[in-house]
Image (cartoon, rainbow, N blue to C red):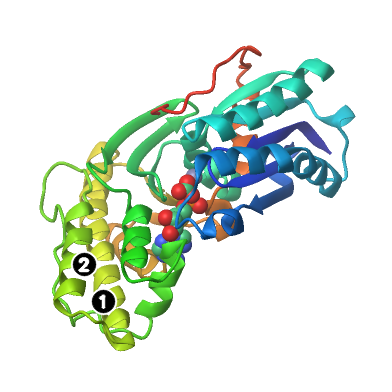
Amino acid sequence: SLSALVLGIETSCDETAASVVGRGADGRAVILSNVVLSQIEEHAAFGGVVPEIAARAHADAIQGVIGAALHEAGTTLDRISAVAATSGPGLVGGLIVGALAGKAIAASRGLPFLAVNHLEGHALTPRLTDGVRYPYLVLLVSGGHTQILLVSGPGGFERWGSTIDDALGEAFDKTAKLLGLGSPGGPAVERRAATGDPGRFPLPRPMRGERRLDFSFSGLKTAVRQVAERHAPLAPQDVDDLCASFQMAAAESVADRVNLALERLRERFPDASDLVLAVAGGVAANGAIRNALERLCARHGVRLVAPPLSLCTDNGAMIAYAGLERLEMGRSDPLDAPVRPRWPL
Ligand code: KG4
Ligand code: ZN
C-alpha cells in the first residue's frame, strides 16, 4: 500500500512530462508512471528550442500526458493527494502551461499544490532512485546548468561551483552544431567520438588547477571552432577526431573540478562512511564523463550514484518526488504562486 500519491508535471523546456510517485510502506519511493513526450521533432528544423513553439506544444499535449500518467499508474485523480508542477527555472510559456494545469487540478479537487524548482527535482533524483541519505554531493550537468551542489535537505542546497559561461550540455550542443551534427548535440558528438582519436587535436582543459570550484566551457568551444576552421573542409575522420578530442577535454575538465569537490567533501565530513556523489542532468548519459567520474570516486572512496538515463534527463517523476518530500514536511504553496523563469536554488 502506498501513502500520498503525488502527480508531478514538468514543462520547463522541450518535454511535456507527467508522473505519479508514491511512498511505499517500507519508506521507499515508488514511480507508478513516468510519461515523457519530447518536442525534439518540432524544434529540429530550427537547430534549438524555440520558446513560442514549445509553449504551444505543451498546451496541446499537457492534457493527454497527464491523462496517460494517471492511466499508466492505474489510478485516478480521486486517489491523488497532491499536485506538483515545475514553476521555474525555464521558459516562461511552458512553465505557465504546466503550473496552470497543476493548479487547476489542485483547485478543482481541493488538493495541496507544490511549486517545484526544476533544479531541486534533478538534485533530489538520487533519493528517488537510490534512497541516498542527506547530505550528498550532486553534479548537475544539463543543457542549461552545470553545478556542483551539496544537498542537505529539500531546499537545503549549498552551491559549491557553477559554470561561469556555457553549460556542459550547451558546449556539446554547440560543438555538434558547428560540425553539422544536428541537435541534440551530446549524443551525436559521443557517437562520432567513438571512432575518433582523442589525442589528435590538442584542446584546452578550462579551469584546470583553479582553487575555486567553478566550471568554464566557452574557451573549449572556441578552440574547437578554431581547429575546425584551420582544417576546413573537414573529412569525416577529422570530425570523429575532433569530437573525440573535445569529449576528452570536456571530461578531463569536469574530472579536475570534481576531484577538488571530492577533496572538499572529505574535509567537510572526515568521519562519514558513505559519502555519495550523484550525477544528474542529460550529460550524465555520456560514457566518457561517467568513466571519468567512476575513476575519481573510486580513488576518493566515494560512492557514485548514476540514476537511469530516463531519470537523468527531464521528467515528471523528479518533480513529483520533490513535491512528495515537501508534502511530507508539511509544506505546500498557494495557488497564486508565481512561475519564475529565473529561480536559482
Ligand atoms: O537534462 P536535459 O535533458 O535537459 C536540460 O538541459 O535541462 O539535458 C540535455 C542536455 C543536452 O545539452 C544534450 O546534448 C546533453 O544533455 N546530452 C549529452 C548526451 N546526452 C544528452 N551530452 C553528452 N553526451 C551525451 N550522450
Ligand atoms: Zn533539466
Percent from the top left, x then y, of residue 79? Answer: 86, 30
Percent from the top left, x then y, of residue 189? Answer: 38, 71
Do labels 2 and 1 touch, CB within 8 Å? yes
Which quadrant holds residue 190?
Answer: bottom left
Which residue position is annotated with label 2?
A: 224
Q: Is residue 234 visible?
A: yes
- Residue depicted at x 50% and y 45%: 50
Figure check: 334 above or below 72: above
Percent from the top left, x then y, of residue 98? Answer: 65, 32
Figure check: 200 above or below 38: below
- Residue depicted at x 70% and y 49%: 34
Query: How many tags in the picture?
Result: 2
- Residue depicted at x 28% and y 41%: 162
Which residue position is annotated with label 1?
A: 242
Q: Is residue 296 left or right of residue 38?
A: left
Q: Check disc 2 and report its element: helix, strand or loop.
A: helix
47, 116: nearer the viewer: 47
| Cα distance in 3D space between marks 2 and 1 | 7 Å
Percent from the top left, x then y, of residue 238? Answer: 26, 84
Figure check: 237 above or below 133: below
241, 22: nearer the viewer: 241
Figure check: 199 above or below 162: below
Image-quarter location of ligand 1:
bottom left
The N terminus - image quarter: top right
* Three-letter code, disc 1: Leu
The C terminus - image quarter: top left
